[in-house]
């Protein structure tokens, strides 16, 4: 999908900054794991809706929020490219978007440094 915000930019009318990207996609589109890892969290979380967090080791996590459905449970292993969720607008958000974030040792990283167009 198309990226709809800038990492580190202000969120709407607030003083908070984006820690990741909002990606426009069609409802129900597959969400794929960016790298091999273990599901650390797979449930509802306030502010993120249905959220999947993958632990890739060495302090790296990837977060996938606002999903319509989650396809793996906490503790399961996934490979790069595996479908882990479907895009939606859970969490009370008006528009259908995937929220995507990468963290290293708890600190948000610019996804643009890690991803290439496929």
Image: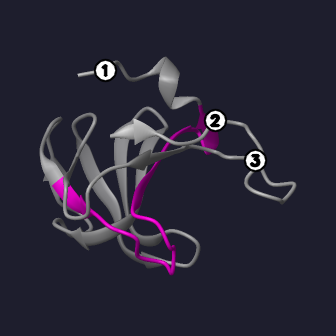
Q: Which quadrant of the rendered structure holds the C terminus?
A: top left
Asked whether, in this view, residue 48 is left or right of residue 62, the answer is right
Q: Going from the N terminus, do you reach mark 3 or mark 1 first?
A: 3
Q: Is residue 14 above or below residue 82?
A: below
Q: Which residue is mark 3?
A: 17
Q: Is residue 14 magenta?
A: no
Give the extent of the magenta segment. 84-109
Q: Residue at x 16, y 66 (%)?
A: 71
> Which numbered circle lies on residue 7?
2
Quadrant in which the N terminus is drawn: top left
- Residue 43, located in which quarter of the rendered image? bottom left
Image: 61 above or below 29: above
Q: How is the image coloured?
A: one colour
Q: Is residue 88 magenta?
A: yes
* Residue at (51, 73) in percent of width and height: 93
Badge 3: few (under 14), some or many (20 or more) residues near its Cα, within 10 Å? few
Element type at marker 2? loop
Q: Is residue 106 left or right of residue 71?
A: right
Q: Secondary structure at mark 1?
A: loop
Residue situated in front as seen by the camera: 36 or 93: 93
Please give the name of the residue rendered at 34% of the width and 50% of the height, measured from the top-left corner.
Answer: 54
Q: Which mark is residue 117?
A: 1
Q: What residue lies at 23% left-to-right and 72% top-to-bottom?
A: 69
């Amino acid at each position: 999908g198309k990226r709809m915000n800038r990492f580190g930019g202000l969120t709407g009318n607030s003083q908070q900054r984006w820690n990741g990207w909002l990606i426009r996609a069609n409802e129900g589109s597959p969400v794929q794991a960016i790298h091999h890892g273990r599901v650390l969290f797979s449930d509802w979380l306030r502010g993120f809706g249905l959220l999947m967090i993958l632990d890739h080791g060495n302090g790296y996590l990837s977060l996938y929020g606002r999903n319509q459905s989650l396809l793996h449970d906490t503790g399961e292993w996934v490979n790069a490219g595996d479908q882990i969720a479907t895009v939606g607008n859970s969490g009370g958000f008006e528009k259908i978007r995937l929220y995507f974030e990468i963290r290293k040792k708890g600190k948000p990283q610019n996804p643009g440094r890690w991803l290439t167009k496929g």
